[in-house]
Amino acid sequence: MKTGMLKAFAVLILIIHSLTTMAYAAVSVNKLSIILSNDLWENSITGTITAAESGLPLQSGTVTLDNRSAPITEGRFTLSDVPVGTQALKITGPYRQPTTVTVVVEPGTNRLDFSVKSSLNEEEIDALARITRAEAEGETAVGKAAVAATVLNRVESDRYPSTITGVIYQRVNGRYQYSPVADGRIKLAPRAQDYQAAFQALAGFDPTNGATGFFNPAKTTDRWVRSHPVTAVIGGHTFFRY
């Protein structure tokens, strides 16, 4: 009687041990599968970058995370093969404050959208809109944005002052570089389309291909402005780089 009970008990222990071993093996396999899946899964971040003052997409710039960088093109970016977890993402772009944000990266494709502030204050932006109206009042929307872009290109150039107001009110040999400053047209209040042109330029839109100056061929015979490489012709203006 006792022998039979002992045998039955031994068989029961053997069955429990076998089931436990199988369950442990199954859990181990599942854990291994999860690890392999995470290692092989391509985690990415994709999204948009816009200018805070206008909502317009940034035309250029860079997004960086964990030593991985991706260009911003027409407001869009994609970072591939990024690590899962909490990460610091950095954004730089034309006339933008360098921005760092904390993001949580999950397995798979992460969609994130950001708005970044301008590095210029309201006074500078207003001045850009004013010179845009004064110099390009009769031009198309693209022509207006082109004029605004040349002012910003001067700000970025070592040849000119480093602020918008400094560029606009610069004098060389006692002469203002922009005729509307001398004749008072700079005082005209900007309109909505003038601000829109300024905002486009501040977002990196530059149809002049990097020009730092422009002239109207029908209104000037100045040899100096005509002596530099032409970068674009838009509306009534010829754009050049100096």
Image: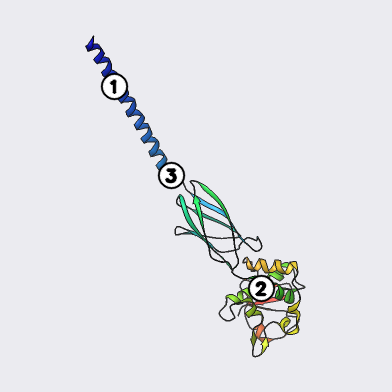
Query: On the image, numbered disc 2 is attached to which residue?
Result: 123
Q: Where in the figure is residue 192, as x and y percent of width and height?
A: 74, 66
Quadrant of the drawing holding the N terminus: top left
**SS under mark 3:** helix
- Callout 3 amino acid: Asn
Residue 146 as seen in the image, left or right of residue 68: right
- Callout 1 amino acid: Ile
Quadrant of the drawing holding the C terminus: bottom right
Residue at 39% x, 38% y: name it: 31
Residue at 63% x, 76% y: name it: 164
State the separation of the CA atoms marked 1 and 2: 84 Å
**SS under mark 1:** helix
In the displayed structure, 208 sits above or below 3; it is below
- Callout 2 amino acid: Glu
| Along the line of sight, the residue nearer the viewer: 203 or 116 | 116
**View extreme (top): residue:** 1
Q: Where in the figure is residue 171, as x and y percent of width and height?
A: 65, 86
Residue 99 as seen in the image, left or right of residue 228: left
Residue 13, numbered circle? 1
State the separation of the CA atoms marked 3 and 2: 50 Å
| Along the line of sight, the residue nearer the viewer: 129 or 42 | 129
Neighbours of disc 1 within 10 Å: few (<14), some (14-19), many (20+)? few
Residue at 70% x, 66% y: name it: 196
State the separation of the CA atoms marked 3 and 1: 37 Å
Q: Where in the figure is residue 200, as x and y percent of width and height?
A: 66, 66
Pair 3/1: label in front? 1
